[in-house]
Image: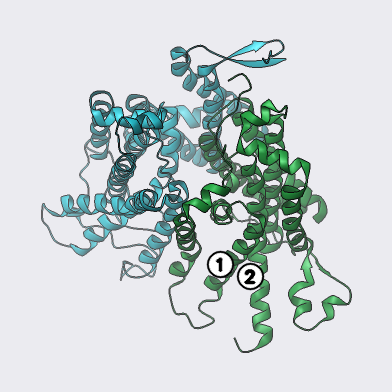
Chain colours: A green, B cyan
Amino acid sequence: MSDPSTSVLIALTVITAATPLVFAAIGELITERSGVLNLGVEGMMLVGAVSSFLCVHVYGSAPLALLVGMAGGMVMALLFGFLTLSLQASQVATGLALTIFGTGLSALVGQSLIGVAYGGLPKLHIPVLSELPTVGPLLFQHDVLVYASWLLIPAVSIFLKRSRAGLVLRAVGDSHDSAHALGYRVIRVRYFATLFGGACSGLAGAYLSMAYAPMWVENMTAGRGWIALALVVFAVWQPGWVLFGAYLFGGITILQLHGQGIGINVPSQLMSMLPYVTTIIVLVLISLNQGRVRRNAPAAIGQAFHPTT
Amino acid sequence: MIHLQRRANPSKLMGYLAPFIALLLTLAAGFFLFLMLGVPVGEAFRAYFIDPISDSYGLAELGVKAAPLIMIAVALSLGFRAGVWNIGAEGQFILGGICGGAVALYFYEVEAAYVLPLMCLAGIAGGMLWAAIPALLRTTVNANEILTSLMLTYVAALLLSFLVHGPLRDPDGFNFPESRLFHDAALLPSVVQGTRLHIGALVAIFITVMAWVLLSRTLLGFALRVNGTAPRAAKHAGFGQAGLVWFSLLFTGAVAGLAGLFEVAGPIGQLNSTISPGYGFTAIIVAFLGRLHPVGVFFAGLVMALSYLGGESAQITLNMPLAVTGVFQGMLLFFLLAADVLINYRIVLGRERVA
């Protein structure tokens, strides 16, 4: 650990582990702020991962593949939206169905992709800044999605706090009846928020298969979609805390990979439990302060809305 | 334009019809899926739905697969009715297998009648312990049981993997990640000679009947139903929310743990790293497909068990990926949720009039 280049390398792996969580959690945050609880993040991520990897394998274009990954997540989100928003199905049940379906579908589509190699997303070195010692490799030598994840957090934060559309989104999520009475199109807003969540989850999946791994492995999300859901609660629906939480979990994921290297002699399976156990602990710690959770949680979350009721 | 118009009263007929509509739609979608995959449709349908149950051995296998699904789903449906979302039955199943299996290995080569009952108790205790954690966290700090029970499923799977790679590994097993084969005294006897059908099938029937009586004839059943449909009324009636959470989770944990023990002491006969083909998750679909009613769940369990058998048979005869089963199960749940809209709404042609 004393060698500075080793600690920079470990910090870099933390960033790659955190990036998919940032995307998935910030997407779900927007979805939930509109009052929709989509438990299908895991399924959307898997579909995003497999569709982007398939695309880059067939067409060789990384930008196109990222778009396809987003589209994959959005198609899944559209399915969720149709069932819960248009047909008033239970959000919890539909979200579970989305995960089960996405897991199966991605495994089916990904059959031919097992063992296929891909070089990973190219790194974009920011001129001059990337030459800086330590800071350069740490902050300015990443692939495009890492930069995008850093920009997305302040963008979402400003959108929610400062823009009119963000205000409408929050109004819909806090009281759909009042928002409806004011003339806002509740269902339409929720569709947009759900689709944004799908696009972000798709990107999160694409990052896993195209940059983090980079390859396709069946069920490769390994619960990250669920961890992202927990992160939104952990962040009490605030974008800034999502970033913090995602990097915390990224660090824990990496601790598990490098544990042996830094002298923690625990069987790998027990180390692999860390992110899941931490998720539970974090949920408990956050839930201890019920007032804080209740003040920030979207009041209408999970409730179906039908204009005539 | 098509729009939805709320019915004055929920349609009972549609409640019964929706699962059948969903099954038909799934079959139709499956038809197109097979066409897209370039599989001969007739053969595929035969491999999925007819071949697996065309002889008595196949029927027994259906029972072997249906038993854990029905046991877990009946228990889950009680909790779902009360608005308790335990989706970690998979983890509770695994813990039951681990604890029961550990007892079997501890009493290795002990030929005694008490071994099997002891294993069952250990399985039940393991499942309950795993379910007690989300129950405790939900009732004390109000931590979301969906997330905690699911996270514990991953922990359980890793714990099992650790045990069969390390402490419980077969010392003469050439380092394969599996335990010794259980001794005869630790194996479930077969109920029907020459098949793998075990006592779990009878337990599944017993639990179905018990849950039906509980729901329709007892105050606890009434409290569960009221808590799910009208939480505030339940509160005013003095039905303790915490008690219902504890009951739902512990009961499911016990049943799922027992099902896990049955699986390792029955068809598998040892501990290995994959003791469940996702029964705990599929049981969620079974519970919904069965309308959260014990009798409905019983039949839904048989249907979903067939989808497992069909998946295996299609993999062998047509070289179809096993993942198709997951796609089918997901689609079935989607179509069911979509068909459910007909219970509360009527589909009307024409413009919507909003007051």
Residue found 82% across the figure and 54% down from its top:
A63
Neighbours of disc 1 within 10 Å: few (<14), some (14-19), many (20+): many
Instruction: Identify whether B347 is placed above or below B183.
Output: above
Q: Is residue B132 visible?
A: yes
Label 2 environment density (alpha carbons within 10 Å; few <14, some 14–19, many ≥20): many
Question: The numbered mark 1 sits on a residue in which chain?
Answer: A
- Asked if residue B52 shows in the view, the reply is no
Residue drawn at 73 percent across, 47 percent down: A70
Q: Tell me which residue sits at (55%, 28%) in the image.
A: A89
Query: Mark 2 and mark 1: span between their CA atoms?
Result: 8 Å
Left or right of B97? Residue B279 is right
Query: In the image, residue A217 lies at what x, y percent?
Result: 60, 56
Q: Badge 2 is on which residue?
A: A14
Towards the viewer: A299 or A35: A299
Host chain of mark 2:
A
Q: Image quadrant for the N terminus of chain B?
A: top right
Could you say whether the residue bearing mark 1 is in a helix, strand or loop?
helix
**Front position in the image: A110 or B14:** B14
Q: Are marks 2 and 1 on the same chain?
A: yes
Is A4 drawn above or below residue B289 in the view shown? below
> Circle 1 is placed at which residue position?
A253
Residue B211 rendering spot, x and y as whole percentages: 27, 31
